[in-house]
Image (spheres, rainbow, N blue to C red):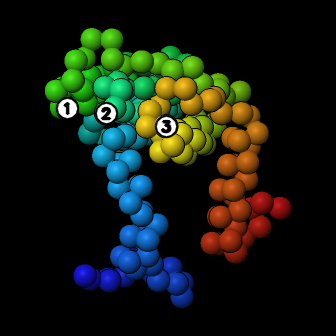
């Protein structure tokens, strides 16, 4: 087995074997059952852009696609369009199988990305334990705040800047 370097950061190396240890047997099985998509409201397929992100989750065990939007309604059209394509790809029924899920709503115009990260993390953990997405509790505002600080801390450690202070 090749143990090539997949990431070199400063004096640290991340090798293929390191990633395999992180995956473990549970992550490989979860990835076959659930697929997570960060969904953007960009209408132009030939260029990058868009201003709002939400999370779309395909659940093979439930034969459903679930949409988690922290600004309810902003990405509904995009969610239905992609969700139906995913269901058709797996030869599942489409009618009524893309569902908007109740989730914590952002209170500002800039936290959608943090909400996507938090929802994905919580839903992946829940799905790994219960084999489904439905029933996962909503995020709390404290979870979103903690994630923002976690990201800032990572940036500060990687860049050596004082963004957090």
Identity of the residue drawn at 31% across and 26% down: 63
Q: Quadrant of the N terminus?
A: bottom left
Secondary structure, mark 3, is: helix
N-terminal label among 2 and 1: 2
The quarter holding residue 36 reads top left
N-terminal label among 3 and 2: 2
> Would you call the spot at circle 2 few (<14 residues within 10 Å), some (14-19), or many (20 or more)?
some
The quarter holding residue 67 reads top left
Question: In the image, which disc is placed on residue 113?
Answer: none
Residue 146 vs 4, above or below: the answer is above
> Would you call the spot at circle 3 few (<14 residues within 10 Å), some (14-19), or many (20 or more)?
few
Question: In the image, which disc is placed on residue 90?
Answer: 1
- Residue 108 seen from this side: no
Circles 2 and 1: CB atoms closer than 8 Å: yes
Q: Nearer the viewer, residue 139 or 126?
A: 126
Q: What distance separates the C-alpha of mark 2 from that of mark 1?
A: 9 Å
N-terminal label among 3 and 1: 1
Identity of the residue drawn at 53% across and 39% down: 126
Q: Residue extending furthest top?
A: 95
- Residue 1 seen from this side: yes
Circles 3 and 1: CB atoms closer than 8 Å: no
Q: Nearer the viewer, residue 17 or 50?
A: 17
| Location of mark 2 (residue) | 60
Q: Quadrant of the C terminus?
A: bottom right
| Location of mark 3 (residue) | 130
Identity of the residue drawn at 56% across and 30% down: 136
């Amino acid at each position: 087995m090749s143990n090539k370097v997949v990431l070199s950061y400063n004096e640290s190396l991340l090798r293929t074997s390191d990633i395999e240890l992180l995956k473990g047997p549970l992550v490989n099985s979860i990835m076959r059952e659930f697929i997570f998509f960060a969904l953007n409201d960009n209408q132009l397929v030939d260029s990058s852009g868009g201003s709002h992100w939400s999370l779309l989750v395909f659940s093979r065990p439930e034969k459903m696609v679930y949409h988690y939007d922290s600004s309810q309604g902003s990405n509904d059209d995009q969610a239905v369009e992609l969700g139906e394509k995913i269901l058709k790809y797996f030869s599942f029924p489409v009618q009524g199988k893309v569902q908007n899920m109740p989730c914590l709503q952002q209170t500002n115009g800039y936290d959608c990305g943090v909400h996507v990260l938090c929802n994905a993390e919580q839903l992946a953990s829940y799905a790994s334990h219960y084999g489904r997405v439905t029933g996962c509790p909503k995020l709390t505002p404290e979870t979103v705040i903690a994630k923002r600080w976690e990201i800032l801390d990572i940036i500060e450690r990687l860049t050596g800047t004082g963004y957090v202070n």
